[in-house]
Image (cartoon, rainbow, N blue to C red):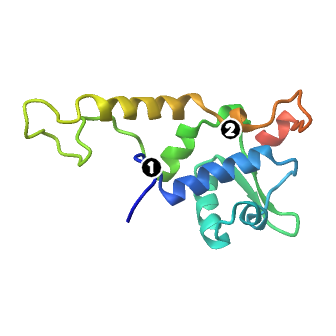
Amino acid sequence: MSSNSVVHISEMLSLALHSMVFIARSEKETVSVKDIAGETGYSENHLAKVLQRLVKAGLLKSARGPKGGFSLKRKPADISFLDIYEVIEGKILMGGCCPLGQAKCPFEKCIFGDTISSINKQFLNYLKTHTLENFVPDLTGANNIVKEDNIYNQ
């Protein structure tokens, strides 16, 4: 299996992040799995499973029926990429440098130096500092998306 990237993001995490941004950007009160699948090309069945995990974790709420779908349970500014990451992949445990997860390096000095540790710290910082709000069009722009505060508290 070849990859065009050194950093690997699971398909499930990609589905979760893209879906959450799609929902945050939507002008609709609720967004259906069909809407997300149509725009992203993801499988509706796989999307439904991912979104239900996000509902159980308290990041989304779901509504049934013809006007049903998914909506954010909190404001976009209050949902970080780290929140989404940890729902899908589990807590990030920063450890040693070994990409194989070995507790002890067989050498006196890691053959990767501090590269892996540095990349992990950078990625963790990105997840912590980026929220869904970062990906919602600017409120002063043409794609003005304004949602009343009370819809996040229902």
Left or right of 48? Residue 116 is left
Residue drawn at x 68%, y 49% is: 20
The picture quadrant where one finds residue 131 is top right
Which circle marks residue 20 in the picture?
none
Task: Characterize the local packing of mark 2: few (<14), some (14-19) or many (20 or more) Cα atoms within 10 angstroms.
Answer: many
Left or right of 99? Residue 84 is right
The picture quadrant where one finds residue 70 is bottom right
Question: In the figure, 54 relative to 76: above or below?
Answer: below
Percent across and percent down for residue 128 are 53, 31
User: Could you say whether the residue bearing mark 2 is in a helix, strand or loop?
Assistant: helix
The picture quadrant where one finds residue 135 is top right
Left or right of 146? Residue 88 is left
User: Could you say whether the residue bearing mark 1 is in a helix, strand or loop?
Assistant: loop
Image quadrant where one finds the N terminus = bottom left
Mark 1 and mark 2: Cα distance apart in space: 24 Å
Residue drawn at x 46%, y 34% is: 123
Question: In the figure, 60 relative to 150: above or below?
Answer: below
Which circle marks residue 5 in the picture?
1
Percent across and percent down for residue 120 are 38, 35
Image quadrant where one finds the C terminus = top right
Percent across and percent down for residue 92 are 40, 40
Say which amino acid is labelled 1.
Ser
In front here: 153 or 71? 71
User: Mark 1 or mark 2: which comes first in sequence?
Assistant: 1
Which circle marks residue 132 in the picture?
2
Percent across and percent down for residue 112 are 23, 35
Say which amino acid is labelled 2.
Leu
Task: Characterize the local packing of mark 1: few (<14), some (14-19) or many (20 or more) Cα atoms within 10 angstroms.
Answer: few
In front here: 91 or 137? 137
